[in-house]
Amino acid sequence: MSGQTVVLFGGTFDPPHLGHLLMATLAHEQCDAPVWLSPAPLPPHKLELSPLPFSWRLEMLRELVKGQSGLEVQALELQLPRPSYTVDTLRYCRENFPQYRFLFLMGADSLHTLPSWKGSEEMAEQTEFVVAARSGYPFEQTVRQCRKALPQVRVKLLEMPLVDISSSWIRGRLSRGQSLCGLVPPAVEKLLRQAVQANS
């Protein structure tokens, strides 16, 4: 997959961690394409939560990928109404960057819920998905289930170790004053602690 292909990696990134970095790096290598990491200002499926302000998450994400070849942070969703949905972001990318073909990077847990996402049929028709394995979501079985609702969906497996690090787990340890176990790089952890303190 060389040439004018871009892998889009959206998420809350609250906070960004080494699991995100691993996933993005392997997608860059295996798809032979740049990866655009695009944090969501107000994720529609997390409206009841209160993520750290977008500016902090954007800064942490930039710190996470600093010096990493092929990884770029793009604040795409700032151009969109809020809450914005993945289908809106992909549509914006196709309209504003017509020179690129966009793939979308996600975990198998997200692929499992894809049929319930707003605009899922449009996404399945327009976009190929690059999917990382997740515990509890066997890849082939998850793809088969997704295709029952979205027969046209195109999926490529991202070859990577099973790494189940969640941002919520990291936030929980941080709130209890526990070590983050090296799962957030030191420069990102410093920003994270500043952000929590500034917004507490």
Image (cartoon, grey):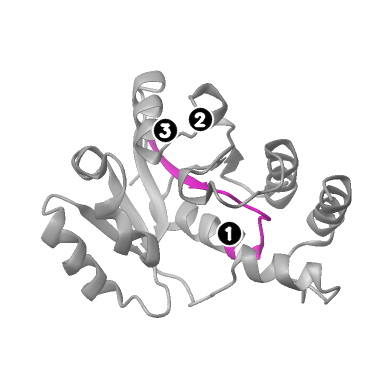
Q: Which mark is residue 89?
A: 3
Element type at mark 2: loop
Residue at 36% across / 23% down in the picture? 99
SS at mark 1 in the image = helix
Point out which mark residue 123 bears.
none
Cα distance in 3D space between marks 2 and 3: 11 Å
Residue 94 percent coordinates (x, y): 34, 26
What residue is shown with label 2?
Answer: 82
Which quadrant would residue 169 be assigned to in this image? bottom right
From the top left corner, tell me how far across and down residue 56 is, in percent: 75, 42
Magenta span of residues: 4-20
CB atoms of marks 1 and 2 within 8 Å: no
**Disc 1 residue type?**
His
Whole-number angstrom distance, CA of label 1 to CA of label 3:
19 Å
Q: Is residue 137 above or below residue 71?
A: below
Identity, as a three-letter code, of the amino acid under mark 3: Thr
Looking at marks 1 and 3 on the same chain, the residue that comes earlier in the sequence is marked by 1
- Which residue is label 1 attached to? 20
